[in-house]
Amino acid sequence: MTDRSVSNHPTVAADDPSFSRRAFVLSAAALAAVPVLIAADPAVAAEELPGFPEDVDLYRSAYRNWVGEITADGLWACAPTGPEQVPAVVNWAWRHGWTVRARGCAHGWSPLTITAATPSDAKVLLLDTVPHLTGLSLDSPTAVRAGTGVTLEALLTHLEQHGLGVTAAPAPGDLTLGGALAVDAHGTAVPAQGESRLPGHTYGSLSNLVLSLTAVVWDEGAGAYVLRTYHRDEADSAALLTHLGRSLVTEVVLRVGANVNLRCVSRTDIPAAELFAAPGSDGRTLASFLERAGRVEAIWFAFTEFPWFKVWSVAPTRPLTSRHVTSPYNYPFSDSVPTVVADLVGRMTADAAWYLAPELGTAQYTVAAAGLTATLSADIWGPSKNTLLYIRPTTLRVTANGYAVLTSRAQVQRVVSEFTAYYRERLSAYTAVGRFPVNGSVEIRITGLDDPADAELVGARAPLLSALRQSAAHPEWDTAVWLDVLTLPGTPYAEAFLRELERFLLRTYDGEHALTRVEWSKGWAYTDEAVWSDAEVLDTAVPASFGESVWGQAAGILDRLDPHRVFGNPFLDRLLR
């Protein structure tokens, strides 16, 4: 096997005058984006992994999550050439006391793949899905069969070529389908005024589109792990639709529908005080745009007053003022780190100049406002993929917390107003004592919930662990408000600040008029010093947000399908015990 240790950026010596803080920031981002794969010495592999399936590529690999906060060097990794090889790998791991962690693009924050404490000599085998588990074909005119290593960009491109698409999708195109389904990935969309759901579409998570899936599960009769296909009407499928990495799915069939053209208009002229005003306020509120268009996103840079606000709307024909876009990623000013932003980030991280957070926020807003005009991207139109995908791996890497607040459509403005008011007040309080815990942005999206009827399959099950699972106690809740706060890794006081926000959400939206659930892929369970560490949130708040019965059912199914916990890690074993 060839050495795949490659670099896609020039090497710059540290004593070279061109080596600036900006170069450091860009190099760090590129390093995090590309895992280093090193060919295995056959003799070493035979000694350390005796009896490993000979026909499966084996190599050493570094693991880096999106921001490089969870890393491990020199783990063993493999790349099965097809689903049929995966059970052989898993059975080898079970018999030799190893765990198997599926790796796609590693575009995530939380310790669902590996934990931060994973040593290089741990018996943890990374199973890379991207090299080969990438099959794509139409299973019917309204269904697509896809390997879980396929990226969302490749999937949506394939669908577009056949006149098909989805209502909403995450902004990054470099997510694998398997990773996206494991954490109920979502976009931003609810029905606009007068809009009806199209056949084959959903306003919920991507998991809600699954018709069937093939997973590696324990077979008691065979005394081994085997591939088994589950249809959406089978009880066990409900746990596998959003499994958090506690299983390994190799292939899925998704319900899809006719593609639509979307117009996306970006604005930077609406003050946050107006956009996020109290419910019942006049003016350009987020809820007013949601009513008219159904698809919105607010990106509110820290210490600024005017969010970057996107509004998508269904537009069968190109509006006169819109630019026709034929490919995704139409905001080049955010695809890479602009010089002014990189210089500020470099000073903040290298010199501990965190007090520059207000300047960074202003720079990010200025770049966005000017860039929208300069690139003619403030008003774009085209097939859905080309306006839905807009984040490349070269963007600024920041850490993020994440929550979904389930509520009724009529209460969206209330949730947004209450949260942003609390965020603004606490940020001002921290700033008053010389602390700057946030230097990124607040991001707000709105989606529908997971309605299994959208799969158009009699008896379809709802994903048990999707944050968009409907509340049995509150059937009137039909909407989720997604709230994320982004900041640079290592920012002082960030964990304490984010803990306060989390506590606010949990006590304010505690199941009476709304309910807070965590966003699996991002940051949650904060203590004052760390994330994914608060015992009360891990042991009580998170399970309670789904209900004891639902949580226990999901954990029980996943444990029965993998009784040896080959697909476990210390964090998942604690969370789903």
Image: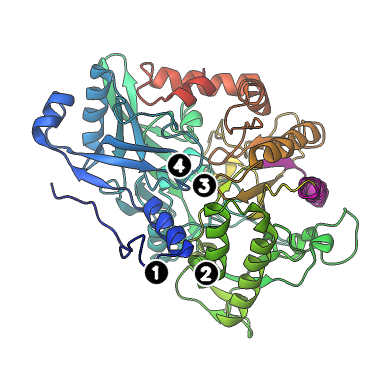
Q: Which residue is denoted by mark 2 in the rendering?
A: 338
Callout 3 touching callout 2 (CB < 8 Å): no
Mark 2 or mark 4: which is in front?
2
Q: CA distance from mark 4 to mark 3?
A: 11 Å
Q: Is residue 49 visible?
A: no
Q: Is residue 483 visible?
A: yes
In-front residue for pair 493/393: 493
Q: CA distance from mark 2 to mark 1?
A: 19 Å
- Residue 159 vs residue 448: left or right? left
For label 3, count other residues whose C-alpha is less than 10 Å away and answer few (under 14), some (14-19) or many (20+). Answer: many
Callout 3 touching callout 1 (CB < 8 Å): no
Q: Which residue is denoted by mark 3 in the rendering?
A: 206
For label 4, count other residues whose C-alpha is less than 10 Å away and answer few (under 14), some (14-19) or many (20+). Answer: many
Q: Which residue is denoted by mark 4 in the rendering?
A: 211
Type of the residue with mark 4: Leu
Q: Is residue 407 magenta?
A: yes
Helix, strand or loop at label 4? It is: strand
State the residue at coordinates (42%, 54%).
28
Type of the residue with mark 1: Pro
Mark 4 or mark 3: which is in front?
3
Q: Which callout, 1 or 4, points at the residue further toward the start of the chain?
A: 1
Q: Is residue 558 magenta?
A: no
Type of the residue with mark 3: Leu
- When asked about the image quadrant of residue 29, the answer is bottom left
Mark 1 or mark 4: which is in front?
1
Helix, strand or loop at label 3? It is: helix
Q: Determine which of the numbered discs, if any, sits on residue 17 in the image.
A: 1
Helix, strand or loop at label 1? It is: loop
Q: CA distance from mark 3 to mark 2?
A: 32 Å
